[in-house]
Amino acid sequence: MSDGKSAPVGENFAVYISSRDQYRLDRVDFHFIAFPNSTSTINIDTTRKFQKMLGFGGAITDAVGINLKKLSQATSDQLMNQYYGPKGIGYRFTRTVVASADFSTGPYSYNDVVDDFDMVNFNLTKEDYLYKIPYIKQAVSLSKQSNVDLKLFCTAWAPPGWMKTSGKMEGGAPMKGDTTGPYYKAYATYYKRFFEEYAKEGIKFWGMTPTNEPREGQNADYKFQVVNFTSDQECDFVKYHLGPMLRANDATKDLTLLIGDENRYAFPDFADKCLGDPVTAPYVGGFAWHWYADEGISPEVIDQTMQKYPGYISLYTEACAGWHDYELSPVMGDWNRADQYAQNIIEDISHGIQGWVDWNIVLDPQGGPNWVKNFVDSPIIANYTVDEFIKQPMFYVLAHFSNFVLPDYTRVGFSSPSLDLEDFTTSAAHATQHL
């Protein structure tokens, strides 16, 4: 190892290891010894500094709450402690859904009264009070016990159906009318009312995105809730309605607004449109990325976006394993999926991403519930028939990052010309804190 000095021969060091056969985030102690004929060198250059990290996290959805509620209180509490408690893995982010998503028992909104533009009939639903609010509060409380200021953020999968040209939440379709018109304004008011009602419950959000995966809304046959926003439409929505409305409201004036909430193929288009507009740009705090197209799109698009717009937050906001049509169900004990997580996180951070947020923090053995049977995997699987939960290999991979790559740690220069460690450049992410 090299940082202007040699490895301290004879001194001890500790490594935390998770492995297929033996270790689960276990500490193993070693000591440095000399290998006179070794040509292997790892170079850590603390003078080359890149992005500051923000942390890692997961999502609390209706499905998460349903699974937690089916466990006994003691087991549910133990599960939540795995992520948020003083002896947990130190999650810094929690994402949640405004109204319903596919990981709900069906589509629902907070206001189904047609053309109620002022949201007079806006109301939270039983799902909020049963499945989301209690567990969000618990996550915040446990995080405080861990001296962590948990950052909550959210988005809606779709507005109420009456705001869309199709008249329903599910299936791709655009909003009704012009971007300066009453339906877009009503959608912004819908968001504002959501934040106000959650504030009454003592829940304050750090951030939001205008909508989830807006490009999927181009598909009229899309199975679940979505709205078709082009980059122009999303930026107009922020410019004319959402941005000014949030800034003028006490419950939302400090929110961080991330644009996109999309896969790599949506960038830098969404960034260009919103930050290229001098009225929209001041409302934007950064970019939200999803991992579902990463296999086919180079991470250089992250570099291009961040080089063009330095100083903006860049956060991965959704990822899950088992999402392909040919691999929908959870696979118990699958280390290949853990490897996929690790490789993706390392790649993303190596190209400027500051944090990485997983999808559902717990699902059932089928990978749900999910009203359109879009079953996927999760780092924790709840087997409520015997009141237990299983921590998947993905959980331990996330633990290695979340526990040791902390907020405000800085990624620094890393190279290993004699070793095949190109994919591990972020192992030096917190070197400035530890060397």
Image (cartoon, grey):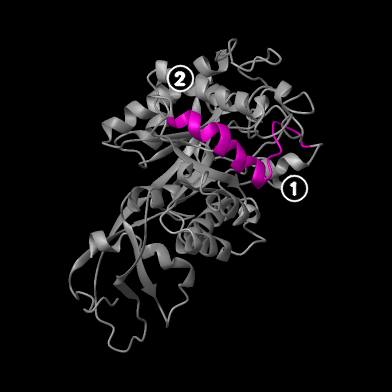
Residue appearing at x 57%, y 22% in the figure: 190
Farthest top residue in view: 121
Mark 2 neighbour class, 10 Å CA radius: few under 14, some 14 to 19, many 20 or more: some
Mark 1 neighbour class, 10 Å CA radius: few under 14, some 14 to 19, many 20 or more: few
The stretch in magenta equals: 222-247
Drawn side of residue 76 relative to residue 369, left or right: left
Residue 110 placed where, x, y %? Answer: 60, 17
Q: Are marks 2 and 1 in contact (CB under 8 Å)?
A: no
- Foreground pick, 106 / 64: 106
Residue 132 placed where, x, y %? Answer: 50, 23
Q: Is residue 126 magenta?
A: no
Farthest bottom residue in view: 37
Residue 15 placed where, x, y %? Answer: 31, 59
Q: Is residue 243 magenta?
A: yes
The image quadrant that residue 118 belongs to is top right
405 w.r.t. 200: above or below: below
Residue 401 placed where, x, y %? Answer: 40, 52
| Amino acid type, mark 1 | Tyr
Residue appearing at x 30%, y 76% in the figure: 1
Q: Earlier in the sequence, mark 2 or mark 1?
A: 2
The residue where tag 1 is placed is 326
Q: CA distance from mark 2 to mark 1?
A: 41 Å
The residue where tag 2 is placed is 196
| Amino acid type, mark 2 | Glu
Residue 362 visible in the current orientation: no
Mark 2 element type: helix
201 w.r.t. 413: above or below: above
